[in-house]
Image: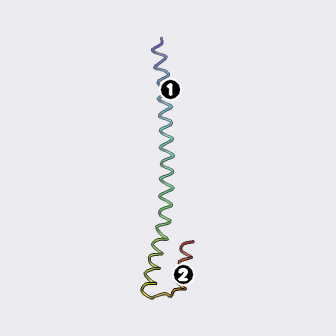
Amino acid sequence: MENFYYGHMFGWGMAGGLMMAFWVLVVLFVVWLVREVASKDTGHSSKALEILKERYAKGEIGKEEFEAKQKDIIS
């Protein structure tokens, strides 16, 4: 009878471990998803800033306009 009891308790421990692993994976997925969304937002503004820098370098816009637009993009 002791052998049956030990096997039964091992099953509960295994189920608890699987449940913990499941929740760890869920949390890791959420963290990854948040980082992906955040990186896409910053990628857009950095591309806009690069375009602005190119326009300033070509002389298409002046220093004052460059600084004003840069503040808009960064904030």
Residue 43 image offset from top left, x and y in percent:
46, 67
Badge 1 local density, few (<14 within 10 Å), some, or many (20+)?
few
Image coordinates for residue 28, horizontal then vertical, percent: 48, 47
Q: Are marks 2 and 1 in contact (CB under 8 Å)?
A: no
The kind of secondary structure element at disc 1 is helix
* Figure quadrant of the C terminus: bottom right
Image x and y of residue 37, in percent = 50, 60
Frontmost of labels 2 and 1 is 2
Vertical order, 14 against 57 (above or below): above
Q: Upstream in the sequence, badge 2 or badge 1?
A: 1
Q: Secondary structure at mark 2?
A: helix
Q: What amino acid type is highlighted by mark number 1?
A: Trp
Please provide percent x and percent y for residue 33.
Answer: 49, 54
Q: What colour scheme does the image use?
A: rainbow
| Image position of 57 with respect to 27: above or below | below
Query: Taking 4 as reference, is 54 above or below it?
Result: below
Q: CA distance from mark 2 to mark 1?
A: 63 Å
Q: Is residue 27 left or right of residue 58?
A: right
Residue found 54% across the figure and 80% down from its top: 69
Q: What kind of residue is marked 2?
A: Glu
Q: Residue at x 47, y 24 (%)?
A: 10
Marking on residue 67: 2
What residue do we see at 47% from left, 18% from top?
A: 6
Name the residue tied to disc 1.
12
